Image: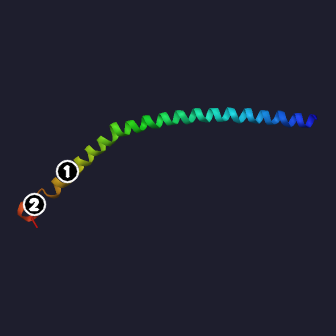
Amino acid sequence: MAEKDNYVEEAKRRIAHLSYKLERAEGRIKELEYNNSELQRWVNDTCVPRMVEMSDELSNRYNSKKYRNKKWQELKV
């Protein structure tokens, strides 16, 4: 009977430990989801518009250098 009681106590201890770990993991998941949403908003509000702006600027620079010394008639095909 004592062996059965030990087994039950060990099972209860493991269940309590795993419940605690699950609770902590769920808390970390919520925190990570919040951080991810903050990061996504920052990317959409700040990074993407800046990347588009820089891309446009770079393509304008490239095109202005590429066609700087060309005449319009030479560019027509």
Residue lying at 79% horizontally and 33% vertically, measured from the top left: 12
Q: Residue 2 at what x, y percent from top left? A: 93, 34
Q: Residue 1 at what x, y percent from top left? A: 94, 35
Name the residue type under label 1.
Arg
Q: Which residue is under mark 1?
A: 61
Residue lying at 29% horizontally and 41% vertically, measured from the top left: 49
**Side of 63 where 9 appears, left or right:** right
- From the viewer's perspective, is residue 26 above or below residue 68? above
**Side of 52 where 18 appears, left or right:** right
**Side of 68 where 5 appears, left or right:** right
* Quarter-of-image position of residue 27: top right
Q: Residues within 10 Å of mark 1 (few under 14, many from 20)?
A: few
For this rendering, which residue is in front, 47 or 64?
A: 47
Q: Residue 13 at what x, y percent from top left? A: 78, 33
* Quarter-of-image position of residue 40: top left
Q: Quadrant for the C terminus, please.
A: bottom left
- Specify which label sits upstream in the sequence, 1 or 2: 1
Q: Secondary structure at mark 1?
A: helix
Q: Residues within 10 Å of mark 2 (few under 14, many from 20)?
A: few
Name the residue type under label 2.
Lys
Q: Which mark is residue 42?
A: none
Q: Which mark is residue 70?
A: 2
* Separation (CA) of disc 1 from disc 2: 15 Å
Q: Secondary structure at mark 2?
A: loop
